[in-house]
Image (cartoon, helix red, strand yellow):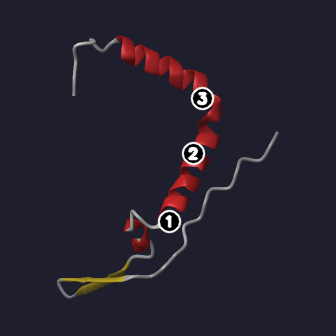
Amino acid sequence: MTQPPSPPIAERRPHELTRHDHTRVDDYFWLRQRDSPKVIAYLEAENAYGDSLLAHTGSLQEELFQEIKGRIQQTDTS
């Protein structure tokens, strides 16, 4: 049996936030920078990790998708 892949670990970068005379530290504030190449790379690594963990459920996912799709009327829009 193979070992499951290791999850990506987000870098901790302390950032102080002060509101209403209360200061707190958010170590993951940097993840809010949506255009940052480092944030995008980290999110891609998380997605790849999730995909690898769920790979064995691919046929079930497809079966559920088809079942749900079959219950939607073709005229429905959202």
Residue tagged 2:
50
Q: Nearer the viewer, residue 74 or 3?
A: 74
Judge from the rendering whether residue 54 lies leftward or rightward of residue 66; answer left or right: right
Q: Residue at x 65, y 31 (%)?
A: 56
Q: Secondary structure at mark 2?
A: helix
Q: CA distance from mark 2 to mark 3?
A: 12 Å
Binning the other alpha carbons within 10 Å of mark 3 as few (below 14), some (14 to 19) or many (20 upward) gives few
Judge from the rendering whether residue 6 lies leftward or rightward of residue 42; answer left or right: right
Q: Nearer the viewer, residue 39 or 55?
A: 39
* Vertical side of 54 occupied by 47: above or below: below
Q: Quadrant of the N terminus?
A: top right
Q: CA distance from mark 1 to mark 3?
A: 30 Å
Residue tagged 1:
37
- Residue 61's x, y, as percent? 52, 25
Q: Earlier in the sequence, mark 2 or mark 3?
A: 2
Residue tagged 3:
57
- Residue 55's x, y, as percent? 63, 34
Q: Residue at x 59, y 41 (%)?
A: 51
Q: Residue at x 54, y 67 (%)?
A: 10
Q: Secondary structure at mark 1?
A: helix
* Vertical side of 48 occupied by 29: above or below: below
Q: Residue at x 55, y 60 (%)?
A: 41
Judge from the rendering whether residue 63 lies leftward or rightward of residue 18; answer left or right: right
Q: Quadrant of residue 58?
A: top right
Q: Quadrant of residue 77?
A: top left
